Image (cartoon, grey):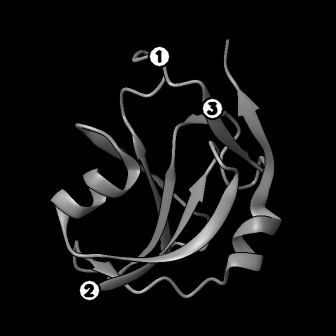
């Protein structure tokens, strides 16, 4: 199991979770396919629903511009990367991630 931080814009809430591979990431963020947004530290990534903006998702997350300038639709899962193409335990705290969130976005 890999330690991660989940941002759920529907609640809204930020929580610690554990995931175990591709299928578990899909289940946790509630999507069919996902994409990754790399953080500037080169160590962390945000997994997000790749179809979130076209499938009717009504809420999302906007990070501070330094992280990513556009809103990401749906739940966001933050993990670390191991440098070899795999995931690693997230080294950020919930407070660290909260400080990176600019706003929770409601889509029409």
Q: Quadrant of residue 58?
A: top right
In-front residue for pair 44/102 = 102
**What label does residue 1 carry, if any?**
2
Q: Residue at x 67, y 19 (%)?
A: 107
Observer-nearest residue: 49 or 69? 49
Residue visible at 52% across and 53% down in the picture? 76
Residue 36: image tag: none
| Residue 22 x, y percent position in the rendering | 18, 60
The relative height of residue 5 versus residue 39 in the rendered view (above or below) is below
Q: Position of residue 108 (x, y in %)?
A: 67, 11
Disc 1 crowd, CA 10 A, few/some/many (<14, 14-19, 20+) = few
Please report the residue visible at 77 percent of the width from the left and 78 percent of the height from the top. 95
Residue beneath disc 3: 59
- Please tell me how crowded label 2 is: few (under 14), some (14-19), or many (20+) other residues with Cα within 10 Å: few
Split into 4 quadrants, where in the image is the N terminus? bottom left
Q: Is residue 32 left or right of residue 29?
A: left
Crowdedness near tag 3: few (<14), some (14–19) or many (≥20) residues, C-alpha within 10 Å: many
* Marks 1/3: CA–CA distance: 9 Å
Q: Is residue 2 above or below residue 56?
A: below
Q: Nearer the N terminus, badge 2 or badge 1?
A: 2
Q: Nearer the viewer, residue 59 or 11?
A: 11
Q: CA distance from mark 2 to mark 3?
A: 28 Å
Residue 5 % position (x, y): 54, 72
Q: Which residue is mark 1?
A: 56
Q: Earlier in the sequence, mark 2 or mark 3?
A: 2
Distance from label 2 to label 1 (Cα)?
31 Å
Q: What kind of element bears circle 1?
A: loop
Secondary structure found at label 2: loop
């Amino acid at each position: 199991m890999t330690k991660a931080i989940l941002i759920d814009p529907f609640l809204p809430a930020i929580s610690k979770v554990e995931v175990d591979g591709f299928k578990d990431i899909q289940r946790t963020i509630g999507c069919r396919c996902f994409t990754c947004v790399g953080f500037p530290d080169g160590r962390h990534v945000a997994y997000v629903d790749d179809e979130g903006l076209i499938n009717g998702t009504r809420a999302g997350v906007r990070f501070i511009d330094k992280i990513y300038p556009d809103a990401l639709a749906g739940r966001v899962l933050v993990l670390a990367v191991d440098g070899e193409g795999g995931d690693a335990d997230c080294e950020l705290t919930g407070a660290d991630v909260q400080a990176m969130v600019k706003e929770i976005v409601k889509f029409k």
